[in-house]
Amino acid sequence: MNPTEEELVHQLSQPNHRASAFSVIVRTYQERLYWHIRKMVLSHDDANDVLQNTLMKAWNGLDGFRGDSLISTWLYRIATNETLTFLTNKRMRTQNSMDDVEEVLLQNLTAENYFNGDEIQLKLQKAILTLPEKQRLVFNMKYFDDITYDEMEAILGTTVGALKASYHYAVKKIEKYFSEED
Amino acid sequence: MKNNKNILIEEISKELPFSVPESYFDQFALQLEEQIGYKKSIIRKTIKPWMYMAAMFVGILIMGQVFYTVNKNIVSRNAENYETYVLSQVDENSLADFYVNEPAK
């Protein structure tokens, strides 16, 4: 039987059980975190790198985790920061190139083997890439994962009202993109 | 003509159009466990069942050996008892006659 949230938090504070408790956490949350990251960076290789950084950062920062928030919220927060840092670095690297970072992400997406969507799904990904990063995060979390606004508030530190407005504008922009295409 | 004018976002499949390499998540977890030094525990966990099985096997062998020895002793003791019983039923003279008159083989 899997340990409860309280048991895991307790085990994390015990040096002898820390690694085994963290292993349970990795196996419980790795998939959700991966898809959270992948939706932002699009390429599998990049998502793999960011996920690894996220979990190693969580492991090295265990002393700072006191269980004030849920483990999942804490991990999502680290994953979000790591993803945004990755995108900022990528943007800086592509500053001198002809293409902007969104264009590079899209090229990676269509070039790699791990994209298996149809035409309309590709068009949706293109439309999502036109959104500002934070809005893209909110849209992905709500649209694909159906994360509640309260959970999002805890993860992103943005008020529920602002999140709702952000999602509303994102949907409008994407629908406008679809109507203007073709 | 704008064909997609009436497409509503909610009508598009919410399934993500991405996939991952086979066994990716299992491999990822193993790799990360190795990085945080959890490998030892995994090896111990894998070895433990084998150690239990080996101990059981040795136990069964020892028990078999003990059972075999005890059983052998009982059989030989029974044979000795039977011989003593038969001899006790025959008087000395009859026994002497038996050995004297026994035909040569």
Image: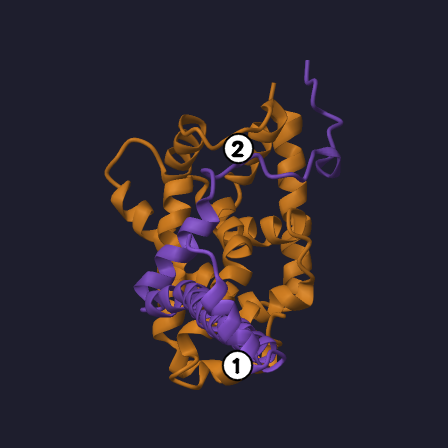
Chain colours: A orange, B purple
Task: Check the picture and name the quadrant holding the C terminus of chain A.
Answer: top right
Task: Check the picture and name the quadrant holding the N terminus of chain A.
Answer: bottom right
Residue A58 position in % (x across, y down): 40, 70
Q: Return the residue nearer the eye: A131 or B52.
A: B52
Q: Residue furthest top?
A: B1
Q: Return the residue nearer the eye: A139 or B30.
A: B30
Residue A148 versus residue A35 in the image, above or below: below
Residue A124 versus residue B95 in the image, above or below: above
Residue A177 position in % (x across, y down): 61, 32
Look at the numbered disc 2 and give the secondary structure of its residue.
helix
Q: Amino acid at mark 2?
A: Lys
Q: Return the residue nearer the eye: B17 or B11.
A: B17
- Residue placed at 63% from the left, 69% from the top? A159
Q: Residues within 10 Å of mark 1 (few under 14, many from 20)?
A: many
Residue A99 as seen in the image, left or right of residue B12: left
Q: Chain of mark 1?
A: A
Viewer can see residue A43? yes
Residue B88's image quarter?
bottom right
Look at the numbered disc 1 and give the secondary structure of its residue.
helix
**Residue ID for mark 1:** A9
Residue B72 position in % (x across, y down): 49, 71
* Marks 1 & 2 on one chain: yes
Residue A17 position in % (x across, y down): 43, 80
Q: Amino acid at mark 1?
A: Val
- Residue placed at 27% from the left, 42% from the top? A95
- Residue placed at 63% from the left, 54% from the top? A166
Q: Return the residue nearer the eye: A110 or B51.
A: B51
Q: Chain of mark 2?
A: A
**Residue ID for mark 2:** A126
Viewer can see residue A84? no
Q: Residues within 10 Å of mark 2 (few under 14, many from 20)?
A: some
